[in-house]
Each structure stands twice: as C-alpha cells, then as structure tokens.
Image: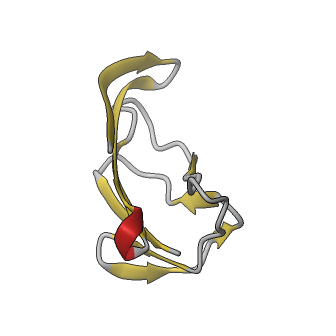
Amino acid sequence: KRIYFGGAKTYFGAMSLEVNSDVLNGKIMARVEPPDRGAVPLRLRLRHPQALLIKSVTVNGQPHMDFAGEWIKLPAGSRALEIVATY
C-alpha cells in the first residue's frame, strides 16, 4: 500500500509525504520533504495494521534512536528524509 501527498500547504511552507508499506517483510518506509520555510521539528506516526510497535528506525540510512511506540521524532531541517521503520 502507498500513501502520497505533495505540495501540502502548512504554516511553515509546502511539504510532501510518501509512505510505502512492506509489512509482510516487517517494514514501513516513508519519505518526508519538510516545509520549505524554516527548519521545524517534525513527528511522524507510522501505525502498523496489527498494532505492532516500532523496533528500530533509520533516517537517511543511519540508525535513529528518537522514537517511541508509533511515533518518530525527525530532525529539523530542510533536506528530504528517508525513514525506514522495522517491526
């Protein structure tokens, strides 16, 4: 399954999000293009269809430890983020 929205208007500028499910292999992947005006902290909620909690996360290929339950705190910035949550 895939969810996508692009150019969504926010108070901080336009942003985009794409989420791809690969739950059969224990993963959900996301790509976030943050708002284009200013670096704002973001939180991403990835809900597993069987209510499993996230075991590990990578952001742009690097281990990321700032997550709990279904929520991932993303670093503020203006560059695109590739997130992989493993269940």
Count of labels shown? 0
Question: Residue 32: x percent and y percent?
Answer: 35, 46
Q: Is residue 4 above or below residue 80?
A: above
Left or right placement of residue 67 versus residue 61 in this view: right
Q: Is residue 64 above or below residue 9?
A: below
Image colouring = secondary structure
76 and 68: which is toward the camera? 68
59 and 54: which is toward the camera? 54
12 and 84: which is toward the camera? 84
- At x 62% / y 59%, what residue is drawn? 50
Q: Is residue 70 above or below residue 42?
A: below
38 and 59: which is toward the camera? 59
Residue 65, located in which quarter of the rendered image?
A: bottom right
Question: Residue 35: x percent and y percent?
Answer: 39, 33
Question: Residue 53: x percent and y percent?
Answer: 66, 69
Q: Is residue 77 above or below residue 50?
A: above
Question: Residue 4: x percent and y percent?
Answer: 31, 33
- At x 59% / y 80%, what residue is drawn? 55
Left or right placement of residue 2 versus residue 28 in this view: left
- At x 60% / y 59%, what residue is drawn? 73
The quarter of the image holding the N terminus is top left
- At x 62% / y 72%, what residue is drawn? 66
Residue 58, located in which quarter of the rendered image?
A: bottom left
